[in-house]
Amino acid sequence: MRNRTLFLKNITLVSLTSVKINETMQAMMYSMKKIIFGDAILFTHELPENLPDSIRYIYVQEMKSVDDYNKVMLYDLYKYIKTDYVLVIQWDGFVVNPNKWDNRFLTYDYIGAPWPADLDFRDSDGRICRVGNGVSLRSRRIMEFPDKAGLTWNQGENEDTFLCCIHKKEIEEAGMTIAPLELACMFSHERPIPEIKGIKPFMFHKWDGDNVQYPRFGEGYFREIKRLIAKCLIRIGIYDPIHELFRKICR
């Protein structure tokens, strides 16, 4: 699949934001470099300059808190989606290795970066939940479920844990599935946990651990140089010891 265009016509690339709008647009454009999606939509309160024709703009009221974001994601966003799946990205989490796409991702209703075990996220039956994260691939079915099933959202509940932990039991009883840890490790990385070691993911979220090598839009020339140096050190396998040495020196 290297150097080939990936056709994902049954997926809409989506981002919902009221912050870092230009950086979010650039993250969408980067995600589309070698992938043709069925649709691409940027939901925000302000039309960004130079929005390419390949990305549709849909106005949403300015979100002034994480709670505002969670409510729109859970109860409104699905109404604008026509494809079977949605790939949700953010300004700090997007596609970086399109050649790592795996069609098995589409056999589940939700897949995102794995959570560390010590977060101790659990569902209503007390089962530990290791897979969630907002930067994710979701079926339209799971996106519309909170609204159509009348699930009650409480202030302070993040939309990813709402789906993948708090209401995981109801989602599974409705016939939907969340991807297993092993496949989630191939899909995306957020935190440097032991299970992802040596795996190159399709996506990432946040610049932690090996994710430091991925692009940061709007950060300037010196940040880009730092990223390229980190990428080289990771490639030759000496990033971790050097990073730890500098942490000790700077204490």
Image (tube, rainbow, N blue to C red):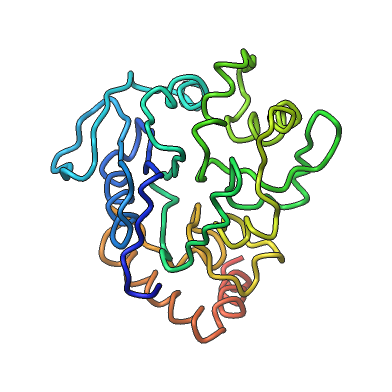
Q: Residue 19: horizontal and vertical position, in percent?
A: 35, 35
Give residue 191's position: percent from left, percent from top. Answer: 61, 56
Residue at the image point whose x is 30% and y is 41% from the top: 40
Name the residue at the left extreme: 50
7 or 231, nearer to the observer: 7
Residue located 63% across and 71% down the image: 248
Q: Quadrant of the N terminus?
A: bottom left
Q: Is residue 141 above or below residue 96?
A: above
Q: Quarter of the image containing the C terminus? A: bottom right
Which residue of the protein is positioned furthest toward the bottom in this rendering? Answer: 236
Determine whether 20 is above or below 250 in the image.
above
What is the x, y in percent for residue 184? 62, 55
**Residue drawn at the location 67% of the way across and 40% of the way down:** 177
The residue located at (32%, 22%) in the rendering is 60
Badge count: 0
Query: Hey, which quadrant is residue 34 in on the image?
Result: bottom left
- Indicate whether 28 appears above or below 75: below
Residue in front for this viewpoint, 21 or 224? 21
Residue that sits furthest to the right in the current view: 126
State which quadrant residue 188 falls in. Answer: bottom right
Query: Residue 129, position in %: x, y?
Result: 75, 43
